Image: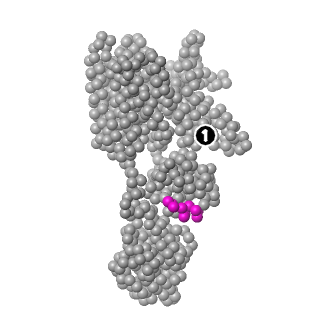
Amino acid sequence: MGKYSSLAKQIVENVGGPDNINGLSHCITRLRFRLKDESKANDDVLKNMDGVVTIMKSGGQYQVVIGNHVPLVYEEVVAAAGIADAGTQGDAPQGLFNKFLDIISGCFQPFLGVLAASGMLKGVLALLVSFKMLDRTSDTYLLFYQIGDAIFYFMPIVIGYTSAKKFKLHPIVGMAIGMAMCLPTLQLSGFEASFAAKELIPETIFAGTLFESKVYMKIFGVIPVILNNYTSSVVPVIFVTAFAAQVQKIAKRVIPEMIQNFFVPFVVLSIAVPVGFVVIGPVISVLTNVLQNGFSNLMAFSPILYGLILGTFWQVLVIFGLHWSVVPLMYIQIAQFGTSQVLVPAFTASFAQTAVVLAMFFKLKDQKLKSLAIPAFISGIMGVTEPAIYGLTLPKKKPFIFSLVGAGIGGMIMMAFDLVTYQSGGLGIFGVFNYIKLDGDASGAIKALIAVAAAVSTAFLLTMFFWKDDYVDEEETTERKGILDREDVLSPITGTIIPLANVKDEAFAMGTMGNGLAIQPTEGKVVAPFDGTVTALFPTNHAIGITSDNGMELLIHVGLDTVQLDGQYFEALVKQGDKVTQGQTLLKFDIDAITEAGYNLETPIIITNKDDYLDILPIDDASAKQGDIIIRTVIR
């Protein structure tokens, strides 16, 4: 149980429960809820809750002010409410690329540990096979390889679950979508084998164009389905679940609540999955054709340029499942000629990725991510880079880009050496054996290792010198000795509260002098709002500045333009430099006399060192008595 789990549960309960939450994000100090019905929230309970500074309502948001440890509370609230993580709300809108990265990393975050463990298991098996300690054809190898490979093979099912939570689709429906995409009977490879066994020839549409595709299946005998191999893929299932979430929203609006439990999933699966297969298939098919033609022409034009481009973008192609555009060409070439150059530039990509992870390990401050870096590094050495990509480099952006640069340089060198592979199979460090000739000539393997060294050193050094971890340990910051997370201002005056923006003095109303509020006094006395020191006392005694023992600088300005009274009707009971205690009388003034003299007694009470605070939150009560809380603050 997390440090803030109890607080999170209380907050969720008092905003009306999970069913009342339409959305949640956070800024630097506040949880920003979008509630279906704000009247269901218990304002008073939340305001007085330990761990909550106050609540605010603005712009259609129900804001619970927490303090500078809000990211930690936010994580617990998301878990307690069982809602999708919308992330931090900043000043600038999130771009499409950042949204995509957020979705990808958010989908992988829940199972990164298992992913890393599975990668390590596959790596250990490869190591045992390499040292002749285990036979690749043995039952033991088969069992443990399938255990290690299962999460990679059935990736769409796991991603279907996590992405469904992200898009607010029923998670089991998301899993069902992933299962459909993993069915052997719906894979392109399965249909190809079936048609070949029956000596059937599939229909070809758009022959002779980039849109040329083979059709193995038609819905209702009319709508062609362009099949692909979706096992181990990531992006296709995310798109289908995103679409399914929209179908679910519409279905819930039109289907009676009595039958929603089974009828909504029925409608969602019946619409989203077929549409997904019909739409995604052609898109992938077209992109595959474009890439196949493009890479073939590029390789004929300039092998070195081909090496640079394929090496650089290989990991991107893998993320989108588009690497299959070139993989078949390798098998065809090896079968026909005994060698292949098609995937040679991609060999250094996993090493560049792994080098970046190693550099990140030395620079990471987040201990949770640092602990993930070790298994990600180990599995990466063995050629399994998913834990590294989705858990570390892609969410941090720059390290992923550095890995692409390193891989591009490595790929270019591989092609400059005119290397070829003599077999397919080994991944990572064991892939070096693919460059050894059947007669035992290892010169190709040595050249491949030189290219790997170039890719590794480039990616490692770029990360070490040009990437900085921006992680801040919020818990450590929150618990720094001697520094408060929040500080309250007690009212120095009894009277009616006026929002600062409504004060009839532009300098105060615009907040240029500081943030706070004003009070129309009903009693002619000013008391100290906290323990502190009188740091400013105007000769006319109409305004006083106090600095609290914690560093807050507060100005109390009795009336507007009352400086013109030249001290008449004001009496100071302290002098500049005096130490004062909360509640001690500082000034007295004659309300009736000042009013009769024609002066406005609106009294601004403002924090002048506002930049020292993350948030300054005047209360929205109608009135205040001396000693009541009138301003809450969150300290940087």
Q: Quadrant of residue 16?
A: bottom right
Q: Say which residue appears at 58% left-offset and 29% top-offset.
A: 179
Amino acid type for the residue under numbered disc 1 = His
Q: Position of residue 78 (x, y in %)?
A: 53, 48
Is residue 254 found left or right of 447 in the rendered image?
right
Q: Say which residue appears at 68% left-offset and 40% top-offset.
A: 261
Q: Which residues are magenta?
A: 43-52
* Residue 46 lies in the magenta-colored region: yes
- Which residue is at the front of the view, 409 or 223? 409
Q: Position of residue 413 (x, y in %)?
A: 29, 26
- Which residue is at the front of the view, 371 or 494? 371
Q: Quadrant of residue 131?
A: top left
Q: Say which residue appears at 45% left-offset and 85% top-offset.
A: 588
- Which residue is at the front of the view, 111 or 448? 111
Q: Position of residue 39 (x, y in %)?
A: 63, 59
- Label 1 neighbour load within 10 Å: few <14, some 14-19, many 20+: some
- The correct choice, above or below, for 304 with respect to 518 in the image is above
Is residue 157 found left or right of 391 in the rendered image?
right
